[in-house]
Amino acid sequence: MSVSHIQHEELVQLLEELCEDRLDRQQAARLEELVLGDPEARKFYLEYISLHGTLYWDAARGGVEEPEAAEEAVGVRDATVAVPVAATRLEHGRRRATAIVATAAAVLVAAVGLAMWSGTAPEGSGIVRVDPDGPAIEDGGADSKVIVDTAPRQPATIVAAPGRQSANKVAKNSTAREAVTEPRIKTGTKPGSKTSNPPSTRTGPPAGSLAEVVGFVDERVTEVWQDNEITSSEVASDSEWLRRVYLDIVGHIPPANDVIAFLKDRRSEKRAEAIDRLLDDSDYIRHSTTVWSNLLVGRGTRRKVNRGSLEKFLRESFARNRPWNEVVGELVAARGRNDENGAANFLLAHLNNDATPATAITARLFLGTQVQCTQCHNHPFNDSRQEQFHGLSAFFKSTRAAAVRGSEAFELISGSPDGVAYYEDRQGVLHMAPAGLAGQRVDLEGVKHPRAELARLMTRGSDPRLARAMVNRTWARLLGQGFTTQVDDMGPHNPPSHPEVLDRLAREFVASGFDVKQLVRWICSTRAYGLTSRMTAANSIDDPATGRPPLFSRVYAKPMSVEQLYDSLLVATQADRITASDWESVAANRRRWQSQFVYSFETDENDEAVNFDGTITQAMMMMNGPLIREALSQQPGSYFHQVVHTRGSDVDRVKRLCLSALGRFPSSAEMKAIGEMLPLRPTAQARQTPASGPLAEGLQDVFWAYLNSSEFITVP
Amino acid sequence: MNEVRITTESSADGSESGTTLVAPREEFIKLFTRYQRRVFLFILSQVPNPVDAEEIHQETNVIIWRKFDRFELGTNFLAWSCQIANYEVLKYRQRQRRDRHLFSDEFVRQVASDAVEQADELEQRRQYLAVCLSKLKSNDLELIQQRYASGESGKSVAELIGRPINSVYQSLSRIRRTLLECVNRQIRAQATP
């Protein structure tokens, strides 16, 4: 047992406090530390809690008074027989996991995983920064932005950084910088003097130029740091940043070769170039299509939805970078067969007996407004009234789905509308709501296709909500938090954390012609996006998990989505090279694999919470799934096979595995643990012969540990 | 994911032939009842206050019932339920945002994944716990039963029986440790016949 006796005693004490509901915050932190630090302690924690829970559940009666006693009794009587059988079967299934937990690889998993999450952990506690170059995005420090002005000017841009020298200096000596510059900034700013009237007519640099928009955002975001008297986290290392931007834009981790090339590149414009390159990559189209088809129709299968057809529509839209208002307009106004018009699938997924779900999701996804509660009553904190909800739903009233005879297709039909929706309030009084949007009534008399009218109203650009909703959602997807707690609840009851940034980006987005790629480019180029996700003592209050509004003084790490996880596993292991060769079968395999997750992620409203998933299901699939098994097998074609047969030292082999899985080199702590575990050979010998026997198995364990770390499933 | 099928119940309806079978109601109810406790324990490991855990458990049950027709017989019911429970825990934590959580996200994540890993082992321990409870001295059994009678806590038990509160905590602690040791012994004895 690796828990020392004293620690064990301490652990028991803490667990006792926990059972009696007397654990205070400090003790809870200590308990976490003990439990997370040691697999034995974790096991013990669970055993203790289960004991406590079982006593609680059965009121300490050993299960005899269960209401389902009849059912239960069988299990208990047969226990001595049944248990060994279960254990053997289990043994078989989990052999890999067990074997590995037994080795020091488990320690490695812990080391790799925890370093990511312990926000304030000092540098070097787990992850060694692999950063040959200084941070490349740096806007020249805070010196240049003291005055809050409204005059057009050219702020420091991310691309034209004042030179790598200053960047390097910052990286090496950040604490000194903070100490020196913070007071200086403070004297220069008047807290609370944010410009409340952003310039509406600009004459200087072209509106929407990258430098100008990004400069504005950086300025405002920095101001908020100052107002809150915090210092931002450091600029992210190249490894961290590259992994993030790959996952965010193309939906998978960077291949090892790209990481190496990026780390070697010493030019200051490399980050900006990477953003452009990734936006032009075909995987950008694929990833955006995945994200939006999940939002539009969910991950589950629905009878009336032809997912392939919807994806085709989205793929073409993102490939041509069609203006967002156009795309939304087509989705809202869609008619016809779902196999012919992919856009029709969106509403088909949300039509049941009445127009309510279709109304709600349209408002939520595209206008950032939650109206489903106002369906039945006026929302107490929200000025969207029942009438507004029903006014919106009036556009959908005449829409219905019909099966197309002789085929599996469905058709979205718009009949002639009443133009009015009727509803009862809670007193049972019948009201009439004329069609309308945002308080503006629309006469649908004689209109053949009311949804087309709605689409026109929604997307014409003078209603800012479409743009604001898209900006907020995109910002949240990239930085890990939106300007509002719920990304799609932007009503007046829920004011945004950075109103000026949101307004400005929304206006620019409209001015750019709803250019989705440009929006991503702006946000990815901001100073905030370039920061590390690690918290420091100087910005520990910036933690939205505590309910405070986000300050964006760091990036908030997010778990990978199921699709990101799958695609990343393929990139890391190149398992697709041994299982399937063509794109079609890769896609089919992915769907089959991810369908195993769908239960837990699908929600009734198909809402954003599907992002919460770095959890048990993933862990289970990862540890035992056939994908991992194949990836770790030494079949020719797999990445692992290449590594085993490479002409390098064994240390190189380990490095390559880490690089491929985590986009960085192993830390010295990891290297040390691995060195103690594996029979690494002298370099000369290692160069001659491929790894085999216990060494190859050890390397498998190492790769397995890296792939199953929480660092792997995190978008940093 | 055949490998992670933790439980081994072989359902009456040819689970080996087709996994596309949607669960008939009766079979579903059986599974549902059988795994109530285990789902509760799974939640409790992440939200260690039993009252909160019960609340989450209730919400989980609602979803389980609502999704009843999505469950396929022959697949792992416990894992399926734990996925739902897991999601409910996250939702609960999201709601609780404003107070700070006792435990971090990382901790919860880790514990949840371990709990699934250890599910069978923990179930085995539970069965031995019944044996161990029957071996307790009658005083101790009485005390622990009082403690875990519905709605009670160590504190209220102390008031009830008029003993100093700290001495009650100590006794409860000792009894729980005794039970844990006893379960460990049983496990060891079972492992080495």
Image (cartoon, rainbow, N blue to C red):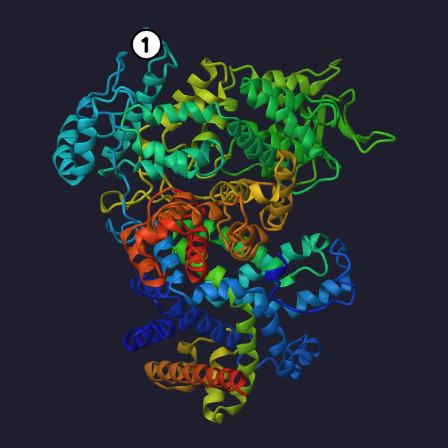
**Would residue A376 be visible to someone looking at this image?**
no
Name the chain letter of the residue that bears numbered label 1.
A
Q: Position of residue A240 (x, y in %)?
A: 35, 39
Judge left or right: residue A350 versus residue A242: right
Residue A142: x and y in percent read 20, 27
Q: Nearer the viewer, residue A129 or A380?
A: A129
Q: State the quadrant of the N terminus of chain A.
A: bottom left
Within the image, what quadrant is residue A427 found in? top right
- The quadrant in which the C terminus of chain A is found is top left
**A672 and B59: which is toward the camera:** A672
User: To which quarter of the image does residue A220 belong?
Assistant: top left
Residue topped by disc 1: A205
Outermost residue on the top side: it is A203
Q: Horizontally, is A85 left or right of A216 in the view? A: right
Q: Secondary structure at mark 1?
A: loop
Of residue A376 and residue A714, the one placed in the foreground of this image is: A714
The residue under label 1 is which amino acid type? Pro
Q: Is residue A56 above or below residue A469?
A: below
Q: Position of residue A497 (x, y in %)?
A: 37, 33
Residue found 35% across the figure and 81% down from its top? B165
